[in-house]
Amino acid sequence: MRFQTQLVPATLIRRYKRFLADCRLDDGREITAHIANPGSMLGLAAEGQRIWLEPNDDPKKKLKWAWRLVDHGAGHFTGVDTAAANRVLKEALMAGEVSGLDGYASVKPEQKYGENSRIDFLLTDPGKPDTYVEVKSVTLSRQPGLAEFPDSVTARGTKHLAELAQVAQKGHRAVMLYLIQRTDATRVTLASDIDPKYATAFTQARTEGVEAMALACRLTPEAITLAEPLPFIDPQ
């Protein structure tokens, strides 16, 4: 997934009201950017953080800037746009580039299922069980190389796990896919201390047949693309 416009480097002044960030461009201008991320962004929103913004000239948008990347230096980045995870995975699924989720005749995003929910992707093919894929963007890291999910309590995520378990019980294939949007991660696990209920729901879902997958991303100021699978460490 290539960014629609060239990203611009900036320095974070502050994040507030979850979806807003005051930033300073390299030319000294101070602007407000939108953040497409409802989570805590733990460890990513410190004052003075080097970041990358995407400008736009869309008259329908109030803000002309969007925060896309955190720059950790040494060529490492974290993608903070949670919606980007679905766009990146959609491109890869449509191209048949996701090992274990390839070979399906149809890839349908945002299909209704469960209790007033929509599955991120429904994969179907004659002779195969329907495959339900729920995607979570992973950005938290509190230990070198270890990515964690979630970065805040997620009742919605817990609900999704229960609905995936119901899908698996009906004989379908259910996949919880964690897309790690940081280039310094080599493995992934759950942040059980942040949301114990989510961790419990995850363990229960696994016993009922829900699969867990973790995929890395390549991130640059030009594009976000899918990379190799990462080992998933089950919570203790």
Image (cartoon, rainbow, N blue to C red):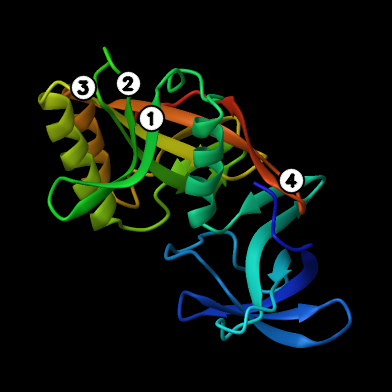
The correct choice, above or below, for 48 with respect to 231 in the image is below
Q: CA distance from mark 2 to mark 3?
A: 20 Å
Tell me which residue sits at (81%, 87%) in the image: 29
Which residue: 26% across, 45% down? 198
Q: Say what secondary structure mark 2 lies in.
A: loop
Q: Identity of the amino acid at label 1?
A: Ser
Using the numbered discs, state the Cα–Cα distance from disc 1 to disc 4 in whole angstroms.
35 Å
Is the residue 67 above or below the residue 180 in the image? below
Q: Which comes sooner in the sequence, label 2 or label 1?
A: 1
Quickly name the residue at label 2: 125
Which residue shows up at 46% across the image and 20% down it? 102
Give the mark nearest the N terminus, 2 or 3.
2
First in residue order: circle 4 vs circle 2: 4
Callouts 3 and 4 close, C-beta under 8 Å: no
Q: CA distance from mark 4 to mark 2?
A: 38 Å
Give the quarter of the figure containing the C terminus: top left
Q: Which residue is mark 3?
A: 209
Q: Which mark is residue 90?
A: none
Closest to the camera, between mark 3 and mark 4, is 3
Q: Are marks 2 and 1 in contact (CB under 8 Å)?
A: yes
- Compared to residue 8, the image places residue 132 above or below, namely above
Identity, as a three-letter code, of the amino acid under mark 3: Gly
Indicate the position of residue 66 as horizontal and vertical percent values: 63, 71
Where disc 1 sits, the SS reads: strand
| CA gap, disc 1 and disc 3 | 23 Å
Tag on residue 76?
4
Q: Is residue 52 left or right of residue 232?
A: right
Q: How many marks?
A: 4
Closer to the eye: label 1 or 3: 1
Q: Secondary structure at mark 4?
A: strand
